[in-house]
Every structure is written in C-alpha cells, then in structure tokens.
Amino acid sequence: LTPLLFVSQEPDEFEAQVAQQLLDLEMTSNELKAPLKDLYITAAKEVDCGAGRKAIILYVPYKLLKSFHKIQQRLVRELEKKFSGRNVLIIAQRTILGNSYKRTSRSAAPRPR
C-alpha cells in the first residue's frame, strides 16, 4: 500500500517526493511503523509563507485525521528534518455533499403521543 492515494489525477513530482519520504519513514522508524501502515494522504502542496520560508501542507481524508493527530508530533518532526526545516501542516480534506444527499433516514413509524 502506498502512502499516497489519488482519485482524480496523477501525483506531481512534489507529491511523489512527499509520498516517498512517508514510505521511508514507515520502513525505517520503529515508533512510526505501525501507525503509518494504514494511513495515506490525498494531496501535498508547498506554499510560500513570506520572508523566503516555505511550508508543506499534507491533505488527509477527514476520517483519518484523528489517527494522524495521534502521531502528528513525531511525524511532523521527522518530516521537517527530511525537508530541511520547512513547516509541515496536516489538514483534513473534506467533501461537501449536495442538498440531494439524504443524510438521515426517518422511519415511517407512527409518532408516540
């Protein structure tokens, strides 16, 4: 299982590089090996923070965000080392559902009085 999952498009060069670093961390780090096994990212972007500093944003599925928070401190520290001091942020990728999506299933049972 690769640490990068794309639904619509091929990963660009930077996203592939981030995915490779996550895979390397999974293989080499004993404390991150088990938690990273089931986790993946959906996208990665590099943004300019001003004053010549850059940050890396990792987009993860909303359902996996809680699992990422458990290892965030160690994961961010390791990734900041690998990417020469750039800040690393983990953000959930949320899907906004349309009005036609049925969110609740109401039963047709009579209301108790």
Image (spheres, rainbow, N blue to C red):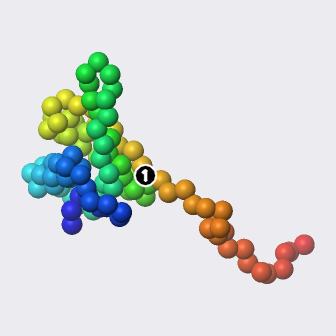
Residue 4 vertical position relative to residue 83 in the rendered view, above or below: below
Query: Residue lying furthest right in this view?
Result: 113
Residue 3, position as x, y percentages in the image: 23, 58
Give left or right: position of 33 versus 5.
left
Left or right: 85 as drawn, with respect to 47 = left
Q: Is residue 66 visible in the rendered structure shown here?
A: no
Q: Position of residue 111 (x, y in %)?
A: 84, 75
Name the residue nearer the viewer: 75 or 61.
61
Q: Judge the density around disc 1: few (<14), some (14-19), many (≥20) Cα neighbours within 10 Å.
A: some
Q: State the residue at coordinates (21%, 46%).
A: 14
Picture quarter with the N terminus:
bottom left
Q: Which residue is mark 1?
A: 93
Outermost residue, left side: 28
Is 6 displayed left or right of 61 in the figure? left
Quadrant occupied by the C terminus: bottom right
User: Residue sitting at 15 percent across and 31 percent down?
Assistant: 84
Secondary structure beneath label 1? strand
Q: Percent position (x, y) of residue 22? A: 19, 51
Q: Quadrant of residue 106?
A: bottom right
As rendered, which of 52 and 89 lies closer to the eye?
A: 52
